[in-house]
């Protein structure tokens, strides 16, 4: 239900833009975000954005990554600039929806690989 795109191989210092589109069957979307998981490490939060546009970033990406969303398109983006080798990971899109009071659903994308060469 989530389709990610935009990963790939980039040199250190380069940029990539990730996109994640939620299918039309997901409604009442609240928070959208990106997480990443490098080999041998736990999945970690990269950035989130609320329905009101408030953003939150991991300290390691502040000033380099920008999260944004297009509610009309049910899409969340992650613009990644000044990429470092340590940014290499599988990036996962996460979308939360709250279709009714007290009910929250969590959706995850299939992951997109980001590789940064030094």
Image (spheres, helix red, strand yellow):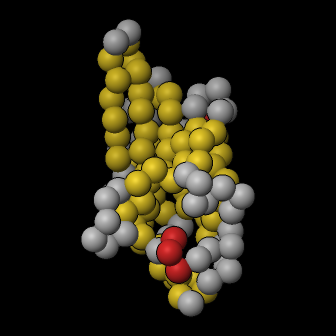
On the image, the x and y values in percent for residue 65 come to: 65, 59
Q: Is residue 70 above or below residue 64?
A: above
Q: Is residue 32 above or below residue 2?
A: above
Q: Is residue 88 above or below residue 107?
A: below
Residue at 41% over, 27% down: 97
On the image, the x and y values in percent for residue 73 come to: 59, 40
Left or right, residue 47 beside residue 27: right
Q: Nearer the viewer, residue 15 or 88?
A: 88
Left or right, residue 50 beside residue 92: right
On the image, the x and y values in percent for residue 47 come to: 55, 48
Quarter-of-image position of residue 66: bottom right
Quarter of the image containing the N terminus? top left
Q: Is residue 37 something one can see in this rendering?
A: yes
Residue at 47% over, 23% down: 28
On the image, the x and y values in percent for residue 58 come to: 55, 52
Residue at 59% over, 28% down: 51
Residue at 59% over, 77% down: 84
Q: Is residue 78 something one can see in this rendering?
A: no
Quarter-of-image position of residue 54: top right
């Amino acid at each position: 239900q989530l389709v990610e795109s935009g990963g790939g191989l980039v040199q250190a210092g380069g940029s990539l833009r990730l996109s994640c589109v939620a299918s039309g069957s997901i409604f009442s979307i609240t928070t959208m975000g990106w997480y990443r998981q490098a080999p041998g490490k736990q999945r970690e939060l990269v950035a989130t954005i609320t329905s009101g546009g408030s953003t939150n970033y991991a300290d390691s990406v502040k000033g380099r990554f920008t999260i944004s969303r297009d509610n009309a398109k049910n899409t969340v983006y992650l613009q990644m600039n000044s990429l470092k080798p340590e940014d290499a990971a599988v990036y996962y899109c996460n979308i939360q929806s709250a279709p009714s009071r007290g009910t929250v659903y969590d959706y995850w994308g299939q992951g997109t690989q980001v590789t940064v060469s030094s």
